[in-house]
Image: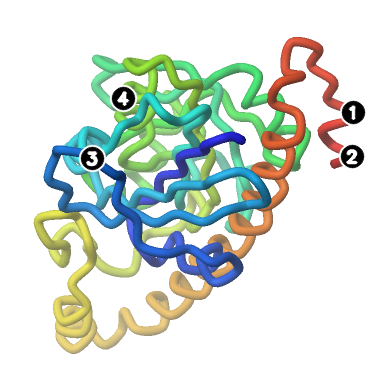
Amino acid sequence: MMRILVTFAVRAEFSRWRSRHPFVPYEFENWEKRRDFDLFKANFGSNEVTVLLTGIGGENAGKAMRTLPIEIHDVCISTGLAGALQANLKPGDIVVARTAETLDQKLRIESDSALVDFAVACGARAVNVSLTSEKIVATADEKQELSRSGSVVEMESTHILTAAEKHHVPAVAVRAISDAAHEDLPVDFGRIMDSHGHLKYGGLLKEVGLHPYRLAPLLKFAGQSRAAAGSLADFLDRFISAIAAKWKKVPSRDLEEVSAT
């Protein structure tokens, strides 16, 4: 039996995948630390998948990872949605990053190379760097500036992978693209998040009420995000199946077998 840990920032990223499998709320037995973050589990055949919702941002991600026994897992997958920084990445694309690093470059960590190979065999596009930002990157101009340093931008992966590495758990950064490099986000999501980084929908409605012209781009972004979450759910089903079937054969790197799984 394998135990696989999958992290998302928020429920919206997880919802499409959750609807396909019998995930239930989960507490580890005899785990002494108080947990303020949502945790779910489901059995995939004889294997157990744990999903941790970290909230948005590096601080939340770090806190969330400290609330569970990472070391009991065989593999960790940091996933969710991301913004594209390169023009060749489109909404709905699945990318796997060889490296994750913070914008200030103070924290840099590599994805497990075998998991990257598995992800590519399962349909992900490999990119060199996923940038982890401390704030939401909202405009095309900001994305253009960051494109010199990475291919996608998100807010958690570097911290998730660092926490997994401390416990010697192989980890990988996988993301679905929600917005293209040339697209601005429709609202300032940073203003409408709670202390755990979850969206406050009352604040979202207020933003739209004050700026009605943002409704159309917001609906477009919501549609792209839902579609990206669906693409991510499809990918995760393939990826989890491949890992569960082939992980013990990783040294042989039998990627033709993996891609045929």
Looking at the image, tell me whether mark 3 or mark 1 is earlier in sequence order.
3
Quadrant of the rendering where the N terminus is positioned: top right
Mark pair 3, 1: CA separation:
42 Å
Q: Which residue is mark 2?
A: 260
Q: Amino acid at mark 3?
A: Asn
Q: Which residue is mark 1?
A: 256
Question: Which label was assigned to residue 163?
Answer: 4
In this picture, is 107 found above or below 120? above
Mark pair 4, 2: CA separation:
32 Å
Q: Is the residue under label 2 in contact with that under label 1 (CB below 8 Å)?
A: yes
Looking at the image, tell me whether mark 2 or mark 3 is earlier in sequence order.
3
Q: Which residue is mark 3?
A: 30
Q: Is residue 209 left or right of residue 74?
A: left
Q: Amino acid at mark 2?
A: Ala
Residue drawn at 50 percent across, 45 percent down: 84
Q: Amino acid at mark 1?
A: Glu
Mark pair 3, 4: CA separation:
21 Å
Residue drawn at 31 percent across, 24 percent down: 163
